[in-house]
Amino acid sequence: MKRKDINIRDPYVLVHDGKYYLYGTRSDTCWTEADGFDCYVGESLEEFEGPIEIFHRPEGFFATKEYWAPECYFHQGMFYLVTTFGAEDRKKGIYVLRSSSPTGPFLPYGDRLTPEDWNCIDGTVFFEDGVPYLIFSRSFEDRVPDGEYRILRLAPDLSKAAGEAELLFAARQAPWARPVPFAKEEFGIDGEVYFSDGPHVVALEGRLYMAFSSWSIHGYAVGIASAESGRIRGPWELKEEPLFPENGGHGMFFRDLSGELIFTLHYPNDKYAERPVFYRVAEADGSLRLAGVS
């Protein structure tokens, strides 16, 4: 099928053995009861086979909603799907599924990665000196109004947390970020509340860049933070202007089969109309910019 016909949010691309494996949140069940994840497989970024269901909710499985933002990693000979799950009887958090194939079937694996008493979404994994770290957003539903991004060391096999969650930075610090206009109406939270989701890190020429999503004057947008130290704990500098300023978000970086750096995100940020889009990326003056549609 054509890429423009794939209706997902939060796209994630794994490049493996000469193919692209595209994962994401099902648009039609993003905000309702949900029961699975899919994968699309292509030899180009324009044509894909799929959807291939890679996980379907097993009988008695706790998660019934918020099947969000699956990211697939090939690690120690296996494929790991790091994802958000939610249920009526617990706060949403980050979990792991595992398979011997990028197209599944994936099965539940290990422990919940994020604290039980926190609402956490959108986990991404970054390896520093061979050590895996989970970076995630702590939701403003926990009455943490600044839009926190936190880091948590993981066990080598990604089965559990191996440390305490540390604060990296908050969306409020981004010059372009604005409070979400719907915090009172949808969540009953008063005051200025900053939204945070979709972190993803790439290393370039000794520097780290993190893409992250928040709310701007034009709605859902993607910003950039950089760590000149090249270390995941920063310090992080949040750039003045957003990378993608309006009506699109939750992106990630990958290298295509020719080695070019690509950024994908979903656009538009309209219910049931979201599609994965791809942009070439250029680095200049200590920041990143989108250099054209790929």
Image (cartoon, rainbow, N blue to C red):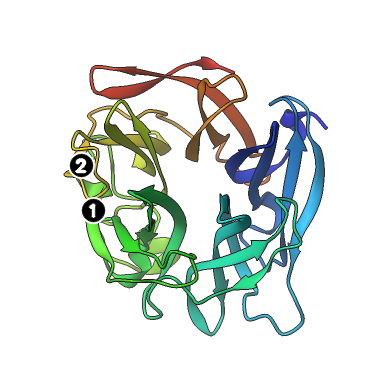
The numbered dot on residue 204 is none
Q: 246 or 256: which is nearer to us?
A: 256
Q: 162 or 294: which is nearer to us?
A: 162
* Residue shown at the point (73%, 54%) measured from the top left: 101
Mark 1 falls on what kind of element? strand
Q: Amino acid at mark 2?
A: Trp
Q: 42 or 132: which is nearer to us?
A: 132
Mark 2 falls on what kind of element? loop
Q: In the picture shown, does residue 118 fall above or below 178?
A: below
* Residue shown at the point (70%, 50%) measured from the top left: 102
- Picture quarter with the N terminus: top right
Pointer 1: residues within 10 angstroms few (<14), some, or many (20+)? some
The x and y percentages for residue 183 are 37, 59
The x and y percentages for residue 41 are 76, 39
Pointer 2: residues within 10 angstroms few (<14), some, or many (20+)? many
The quadrant in which residue 99 appears is bottom right
Res 233 seen here: yes
217 left or right, relative to 285: right
* Residue shown at the point (30%, 36%) measured from the top left: 208
Q: State the residue position of label 1.
A: 168
- Picture quarter with the C terminus: top right
Q: State the residue position of label 2.
A: 236
The quadrant in which residue 64 appears is bottom right
220 left or right, relative to 50: left
Res 217 seen here: no
CA–CA distance in space, label 2 to label 1? 7 Å
Q: In the picture shown, does residue 270 fall above or below 156?
A: above
